Structure formats: C-alpha cells, structure tokens
Amino acid sequence: MMMSGEASLDGERERTERTAAKERETQSEKRDEQGRVPDERARRHQVSRRDGAADDGRADCTQNMVSDFWSNGKPPGATAVVCYKHGYRYKVSDFSVLHYRFFASRTCHSYADFFGPNNIPYDCFYLIGANTFEPRDDAGYDNLAIMKDDSKCTWADRKLTCLA
C-alpha cells in the first residue's frame, strides 16, 4: 500500500524529470551541431533522406557549407545561400548582380563509393532580395543545401522563393 507522502514524492520526481527534459530540449534548439547560436531568422532547409539512401557524409558537409557561408560574409540584402551539386541544372529568376552572387565552388567527400572516397563538387551562391531558385535535377539531401531567411523566403514544391 502506498502512503500519501510516497505518492507526492513520486509526483514531484516526475515533474522534476519533465522540467529537466524540457530544459535540455530548449537548450539544444538554441545551438547548432557545432555549438553555435544560429541567426533566429535563418533556418537551414534540409531535404528529407530517402528511404535506403546511403549516409556518405555529403548531407552534413553541404549543410555545414551553407551554415558557414550564411554566418561569414554574406552580402548585404542576402535572403538565402544555396549549395547545389556542380553540373546540375537549375533556374534562377534574376541573375543580375543585384539579385544573384556566385560565391564559391567547394568539395565534399563521399565515402559510400565501392572504389574509395569521391570528391563531389558543389556550386554555392547567394540570392539577394527578391529572387527564385528551382533545381532541375536531383534535389535530394546530398545534392542540395539551402539556408534562408525564414521571414523572406519559402521552400515549397522544389522552389525557393524569396521576397525583398
């Protein structure tokens, strides 16, 4: 038989555990994988992994690229940074220097290849102000990474739309 004092201790323990779990969850939301506090308006777009897709490290690499490019030296008025596999086709509505800026080509290493590591090149660029980006080839998690200002950009139906 449980006494009322034991029941209140169990209830108190449960509340304490729930409070601690909620606090851990809130703290983990405030920092990214490298422990950096992210810009509250900017969120990385992560395409869901396809069932059965190999985890060769490229998704983490591309996500880290866009995060670094967004945090370090983005041009004034930038609304998004995109890294897309080199050679893949895409459409941008405005390639003028006022709305598009190619930033860099970077390489990620794939370790899922039977013959050993592969170097996979990516093209990274900024969208500035109002612009759109539409991938024309595979836009899976390992080929595309986007970081955008959520107050100005949306990703829907394989199209990134940013407003000024």
Image: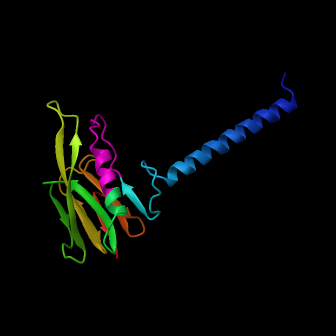
Asked if the stretch drawn in magenta spans residue 145, the answer is no
Q: Residue at x 51, y 51 (%)?
A: 29
Q: Is residue 115 above or below residue 89?
A: above
Residue 17 percent coordinates (x, y): 67, 39
Which of the image's four quarters has the N terminus?
Answer: top right
- Residue 30: x and y in percent read 51, 54
Among the 4 quarters of the image, the one containing residue 69:
bottom left
Comparing 84 with 4, the one in front is: 84
Residue visible at 17% across and 40% down in the picture: 118
Q: Is residue 65 left or right of residue 11?
A: left
Q: How many marks?
A: 0
Q: In the image, which residues are magenta?
A: 46-66
Q: What residue sits 16% from the left and 54% below the top?
A: 86
Q: Quadrant of residue 66?
A: bottom left
The residue located at (26%, 46%) in the rendering is 142
Relative placement, left or right, of 14 versus 122 is: right
Residue 64 on the magenta segment: yes
Q: Position of residue 9 (x, y in %)?
A: 80, 34
Q: Quadrant where the C terminus lies?
A: bottom left
In front here: 38 or 159? 38
